[in-house]
Structures are given as structure tokens and as C-alpha cells.
């Protein structure tokens, strides 16, 4: 089996280089080098020569496979990009509702197509035939890796009236249909507050989980429990083994069928397919009279996935899944042995006692979690900017409970079709456990410094040094000393984050089409507006940006007005940080956001300051002036703010119109500005020529994202150029930071 392992891993390395790292010419050169090295190695008769030949073979085959797949599968679709064509599709999965209509996974010939429909797609089910004029978009294999990594090279956007023809289910449709039926039954069995979590735990569908819960699970380091993968597959194997009374051959046969049906039901996602292939190799090894080799099983699983679609190597889920298993295989054993020696677990007098059993369980759990984290932690830091320090405790406390809930879940759903009243009562009792788990997740996510963010350079430095120490510990077998140094450095991170603070740090976060501004000055922090294209994520971005600099509280949350793109992230920010005071304009009495914010502030005991007259917040070496609404004619007539610190004046006008800006100029003494935040995201109705000529800003900042309004408009950009103001915008420059 090790021969196959060497070929598999070298094949995977070639795919990673071709898809993710190297330009085409470099890949051609690498192919030539691999062929030459392989030919030279043919003259070496030693074991090393054999390994070199196998590695060169896998490398060259991987590069050839990627090139062939790109030329014969992907490039022919390129001519369809941007065209509107009549297209016929066969539905593969149930329709999912989105914010802009609905989407459904289909197939056109041999190509998987994600179709976006204008309405909710009611009445469409698996096996139906769809016919419509659609605007087609092709995923570029060199750029748009998200869809192509999921084996979806073509997107279709409905352009004309959709026609639906009812179809019949084929053999391959039954797993997807059962998946849909099971989801419906889970929603029926469990209460509304626990059904989304059970849906995610049993089927991997996280679409109904709230943003807050998904974020809490990420911070607590247990998101993997709802990314159906190795843990779930292992539990299914254990369940089948017990049902088959541990009869080896019978259990292996039943298990193989159950696992592959399970993978088909979940759409052969990378993490599930990896786990199923590895377990299949393990189950078949005794039957074929071969020893099971963990790394070889991992390599075979990777090879199977990459043969189907080489671009799946770009899937974050696949990378995390394989990294976790590789880390467990590589590190968990040595860590477990070291912990056992440290705790003296294997002493003969304790081996069969309760103390010994508990300690062996704990050391094994800790070793597994740490082993998985060794290779996944850099990936989560890179892709998600998060390092969960609390994950070890979270997994020790919650993983056994969640494993039991998962093991009960599938039999409960199956029995519900025969004994619905009884299973519904059991589901109610199980929901008590689930609520306790969700409460614990929220509690663990709120632990100060339970998660660190790579926005802080000190966290990145700590990670780099920690991995250097890990390598040295592995080389010189001194894990205790290395662990002490890593923990000691970790304790200095919060201190370093808060010890260096500028007189002024003004941040315009990139939140898409919205606005979220952060002010840090000495010992005072403020957030001005908190909304964006993705609502709650703007509040999370604000919390992470502040916490990565050592802030745990926000002295002032100031909202200019109540439009969603300015306040949509406030509740998430309130969940994540302590807000000492909330400043609101007394406008828009019928606004649902105004009512919700007032209610949430009351529940959290946050004092509200209604700004009906001008006020000022003192800073260490400056001030933050809050101007009351100059008029109340529209919902955009809210607060304006002037930040003045050490010869740096920054004006923020929210979404004030030209008329509001004129009133502001007439009633307030505004200085010449270093920075002006463009009103209404660069709308032509804001940032008037009069305001620009009077304040003479050196820099115009525009908080803007993808939008159908044409923001920022050419008029605003030309006005800024006319007064000599430089322009920076978040859609092009990302998050913008100004310091003094």
C-alpha cells in the first residue's frame, strides 16, 4: 500500500502547485524536471531510487491530469461566459431560498450548474427538468476557485420565464431525495430553537443556523461538528458494527454500503468523501489480506477526490479535513505518550482502575485535539483570521455529548416514521441537552482572549515562533520546555496589543455597501455606525478589529441614523463587546431598527443618550463633537460628527443630503478638514460642492461596496478632484486606517 501512498501524495502536490501556486510555464518546467529525475532514478537500484521514481511518476501524472482536465473540461465552457442562451437543466437537489430569489443545483449534460431563479422556485423538486433563457457565467479556473472547487464550473441566472417539466427519479436521485425527506422530518421532530442545530449536526446543512451561533462555534473551535466529516463517519461505522454484532465480514460489507450511500446523500462533499474512502480502505484491508496504513489511506482518499476534480484542492473544507487527519496521524500518538508519561497514567497499579481509565481518556482526547490543531491552525488563521485558544476545552467538554447526540439522531429520525409521537417526545428531551450545549458554546465564545485574531501582528509573530519551537521540540525531544515558552509568549500577546496605542487611530472598515468607523484615542474607544452588505458581519468585523488591539469595551456606540447599512451589525457588536453608552438621533420614530435597538439596550442595561443638542466627548488630546440633527425632513437627517485630535480634523455626515449639509455649514463652525467621510457612500445627493469648497479636505474617504446605485458617482469624484482632495475607497483599498 505504501507504493500507492507515495504516488498519491506526489500527485496531490502536483495538483496543488498547478492550481494554487505556480504559473503555467513553471508547471511545464517542473514536468520536465520530474520526467528527467524519474529517468535518472531508473538507474538506481536502492530503495531510495524506487521512492524517487514513484514520486516523479505521481508528480508528472498530476501535472498532466490538471492540464488535460483544464483543456477538455473547463476551457470549452469559456465561450459561454456572459452569453444569454436557452438552457435545459435537470434538478439534482432541493431549491434553496436566498435573499434575492432562490438557487438550485442542476446538471446540463455532464456539467453541474448552479441556477439562480427570480422567485422562490416553489413546486420544483429533484428530477424535474427546467427550461429557461439564462445569462451564463463560467468560473475561471485561474481566479474563481470557490465554485469550481465544488465542481460547479457554470452559473446560470434566469433571464426569462421559467418552464418546469415534472420528471421521474433516477437511481442517483434517491440519496438526495432521502436527504431532503430527512431534513423535513428533523424540522418536524425538533422545536424551532434546536431544529437548525440538529439539521447541521446530522446533515451538514448550516444554512438555517443564525450568524451569531455560527460565529460562536468558530470562536469556540467546534465548527467541525457541523461540517459532517470523519467524526460522523466513524460514529456511523461504530453503529453499524454494533448492529452487526461485530461480525467482521458482515459488518464490513454493510458498513461499506452504508458509508457510500451516506456520502451520496450528502452530495459527496470533500470532507465526507475523504472519510468514507479512508474507512473503506480500512474495512477492505483485512478482506484483501493487507495491513491498513493510515497515511496511505489518506493519500488514496485525496487521489480519488482529485481525479474527479483537481480544482477541489482549493476547497477550504477539503484542506482542513485532510490537515486534521494528517495532524492526528502524525502528532497524536507522540503527544499522547508524552502526556501519559507526564501524568504517570500507565503505572501497573493504576492501569485498570477508574483513575487510569479517566486519565487515558483525557490524554487521548487532548492528544487528538492538539494533533488535529497542529496543521489546521495555520489554515484557520490564514482563511478566517482566527486562532481559537479555547478549542481544547470546548472539545473536551462538548465533543462526547455531541457524539452521543449524533448517534441518537439518525435512529430517532428513522424510527419517527413508525413511532412519531414517541420519537417526538424523545426529541423534546434531547433538545434540553442541545440547549445546554448551545448555552455552553455561547459562554465559551465569550471568554476573554479565548480567540485571537491575525489582524494583530503580535498574534502572527506568536504563531510563527510557536511553530519554530514545535519543530525544535520534535527535533530535540523537549516538548515540556517548548510548551512553556509558547504559553509564556501567549501571555504577553494581550499586553503587547494594548501597550502601544496612538493619540488617534481612525479606521474605516471594509464592510461592503455600508459604514462602520472606529475611533481609538488613548483610553477611549468609539464605534460610529455599524452596518454593511452582510449585516451582522460588520459588527463582528468591528469587534475583532478592536479586540485585536486589546479593547474589551466600547465607550460610545454612535449611530448617525437608522438605515440598515449603518446599524445592521449593532446587535452582533453588542453580543461581542460591552457597550458603555449608546448615542442615538431622535428621528424616525417608526423605524423598526430604532425600536429594536432601544429594546436591546434596555435588556443589556446600556444607557441611551438621545442627541437633541450638540455634545462633546473628551479625548486624551482632542475631542469628538456630536452635532444634533440640523433638520428632520427625511430618515437620513441624522447626526454629524467632528473628530479633532492634534491638528487632524475628520468630519462624518452620515447620509446627509445637500440641504442638510448646507444647514450644517450655516449653523456650525467647521474648520478646514484633513479628512472628510463622503456622505451616503458617494451618492450624488451628498458631499456637495459647497461642503467641499468650505472645508477643503485633503482626503475624501468613501465607504462603499458592490451596489446597483452607481456609488460612488462620477459627480462626487469630480467634485473631490476640483478641490484637490485625494480619494480612498473601501471597495478598492480595503480597510483604511489613519493614525496620529
Image: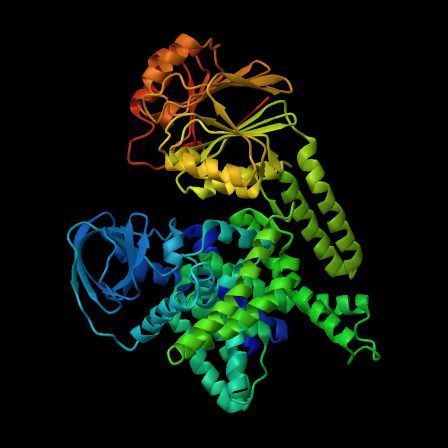
Image quarter for residue 261? bottom left
- From what the image shows, is residue 551 above or below residue 356? above
Q: Quadrant of the N terminus?
A: bottom right
At 46% from the left and 72% from the top, the residue drawn is 425
- From what the image shows, is residue 677 above or below residue 40? above
Residue 455: give x, y in percent of width and height: 57, 40
Q: Is residue 479 visible?
A: yes
Q: Is residue 692 visible?
A: no
Residue 634: give x, y in percent of width and height: 32, 24
Q: Quadrant of the C terminus?
A: top right
Q: With 464 as the anchor, is 644 left or right in this view?
A: left
Question: 564 and 389: which one is in front?
Answer: 564
Q: With 355 as the anchor, is 706 left or right in this view?
A: left
At 44% from the left and 80% from the top, the residue drawn is 258
Count of marks overlaid on the render: 0
- From what the image shows, is residue 204 above or below residue 82? below
Amino acid at each position: 500500500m505504501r507504493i500507492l501512498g507515495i504516488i498519491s501524495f506526489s500527485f496531490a502536490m502536483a495538483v496543488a502547485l498547478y492550481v494554487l501556486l505556480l504559473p503555467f510555464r513553471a508547471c511545464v518546467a517542473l514536468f520536465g524536471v520530474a520526467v528527467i529525475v524519474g529517468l535518472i532514478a531508473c538507474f538506481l537500484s536502492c530503495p531510495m531510487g524506487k521512492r524517487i521514481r514513484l514520486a516523479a511518476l505521481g508528480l508528472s501524472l498530476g501535472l498532466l491530469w490538471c492540464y488535460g482536465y483544464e483543456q477538455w473540461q473547463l476551457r470549452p465552457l469559456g465561450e459561454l461566459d456572459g452569453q444569454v442562451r436557452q438552457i435545459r437543466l435537470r434538478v439534482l437537489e432541493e431549491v434553496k431560498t436566498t435573499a434575492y430569489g432562490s438557487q438550485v443545483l442542476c446538471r446540463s449534460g455532464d456539467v453541474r450548474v448552479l441556477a439562480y431563479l427570480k422567485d422562490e422556485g416553489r413546486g420544483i423538486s429533484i428530477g424535474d427538468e427546467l427550461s429557461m433563457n439564462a445569462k451564463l457565467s463560467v468560473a475561471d479556473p485561474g481566479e474563481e476557485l470557490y465554485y469550481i472547487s465544488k465542481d460547479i464550473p457554470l452559473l446560470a441566472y434566469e433571464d426569462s420565464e421559467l418552464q418546469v417539466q415534472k420528471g421521474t427519479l433516477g437511481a442517483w436521485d434517491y440519496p438526495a431525495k432521502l436527504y431532503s425527506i430527512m431534513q423535513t422530518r428533523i424540522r418536524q421532530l425538533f422545536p424551532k430553537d434546536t431544529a437548525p442545530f440538529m439539521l447541521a449536526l446530522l446533515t451538514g446543512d448550516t444554512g438555517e443556523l443564525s450568524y451569531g451561533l455560527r460565529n460562536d462555534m468558530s470562536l469556540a473551535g467546534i465548527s467541525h461538528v457541523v461540517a459532517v466529516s470523519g467524526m460522523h463517519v466513524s460514529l456511523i461505522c461504530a453503529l453499524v458494527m454494533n448492529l452487526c454484532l461485530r461480525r467482521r465480514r458482515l459488518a464490513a460489507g454493510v458498513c461499506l454500503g452504508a458509508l457510500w450511500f451516506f456520502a451520496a446523500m450528502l452530495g459527496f462533499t470533500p470532507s465526507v468523501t475523504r472519510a468514507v474512502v479512508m474507512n473503506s480502505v480500512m474495512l477492505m484491508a483485512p478482506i484483501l489480506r493487507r495491513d491498513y496504513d493510515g497515511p496511505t489511506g489518506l493519500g488514496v482518499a485525496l487521489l480519488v477526490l482529485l481525479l474527479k476534480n483537481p480544482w477541489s484542492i482549493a476547497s477550504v473544507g477539503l484542506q482542513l479535513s485532510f490537515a486534521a487527519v494528517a495532524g492526528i496521524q502524525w502528532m497524536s500518538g507522540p503527544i499522547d505518550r508524552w502526556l501519559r508519561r507526564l501524568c504517570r497514567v500507565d503505572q501497573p497499579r493504576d492501569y485498570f482502575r477508574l483513575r487510569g481509565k479517566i486519565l487515558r481518556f483525557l490524554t487521548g482526547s487532548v492528544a487528538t485535539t492538539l494533533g488535529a490543531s497542529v496543521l489546521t491552525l495555520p489554515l484557520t488563521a490564514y482563511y478566517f483570521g482566527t486562532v481559537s485558544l479555547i478549542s481544547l476545552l470546548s472539545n473536551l467538554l462538548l465533543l462526547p455529548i455531541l457524539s452521543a447526540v449524533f448517534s441518537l439522531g439518525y435512529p430517532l429520525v428513522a424510527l419517527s416514521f413508525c413511532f412519531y409521537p414517541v420519537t417526538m417526545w424523545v426529541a423534546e428531551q434531547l433538545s434540553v441537552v442541545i440547549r445546554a450545549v448551545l448555552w455552553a458554546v455561547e459562554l465559551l465564545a465569550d471568554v476573554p482572549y479565548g480567540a485571537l485574531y491575525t489582524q494583530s501582528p503580535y498574534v502572527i509573530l506568536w504563531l510563527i515562533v510557536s511553530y519554530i519551537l514545535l519543530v525544535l521540540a520534535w527535533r530535540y525531544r523537549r516538548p515540556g520546555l517548548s510548551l512553556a515558552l509558547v504559553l509564556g509568549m501567549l501571555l504577553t500577546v494581550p499586553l503587547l496589543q494594548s501597550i502601544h496605542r496612538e493619540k488617534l487611530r481612525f479606521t474605516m472598515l471594509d464592510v461592503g455597501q455600508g459604514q462602520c468607523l472606529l475611533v481609538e484615542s488613548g483610553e477611549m474607544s468609539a464605534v460610529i455606525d455599524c452596518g454593511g452588505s452582510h449585516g451582522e458581519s460588520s459588527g463582528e468585523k468591528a469587534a475583532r478589529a478592536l479586540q485585536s488591539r486589546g479593547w474589551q469595551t466600547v465607550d460610545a456606540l454612535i449611530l448617525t441614523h437608522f438605515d440598515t447599512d449603518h446599524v445592521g451589525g449593532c446587535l452582533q457588536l453588542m453580543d461581542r463587546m460591552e457597550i458603555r453608552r449608546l448615542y442615538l438621533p431622535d428621528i424616525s420614530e417608526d423605524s423598526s431598527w430604532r425600536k429594536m435597538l432601544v429594546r436591546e439596550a434596555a435588556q443589556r442595561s446600556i444607557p441611551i443618550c438621545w442627541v437633541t443638542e450638540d455634545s462633546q466627548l473628551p479625548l486624551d488630546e482632542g475631542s469628538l463633537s456630536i452635532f444634533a440633527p440640523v433638520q428632520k425632513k427625511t430618515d437620513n437627517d441624522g447626526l454629524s460628527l467632528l473628530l479633532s485630535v492634534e491638528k487632524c480634523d475628520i468630519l462624518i455626515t452620515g447620509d446627509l443630503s445637500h440641504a442638510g449639509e448646507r444647514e450644517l455649514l450655516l449653523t456650525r463652525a467647521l474648520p478646514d478638514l484633513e479628512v472628510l467621510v463622503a456622505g451616503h457612500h458617494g451618492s450624488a445627493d451628498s458631499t456637495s460642492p459647497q461642503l467641499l469648497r468650505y472645508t477643503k479636505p485633503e482626503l475624501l474617504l468613501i465607504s462603499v461596496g458592490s451596489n446597483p446605485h452607481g456609488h460612488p458617482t462620477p459627480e462626487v469624484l469630480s467634485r473631490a478632484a476640483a478641490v484637490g482632495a485625494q480619494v480612498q475607497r473601501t471597495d478598492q483599498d480595503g480597510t483604511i486606517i489613519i493614525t496620529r
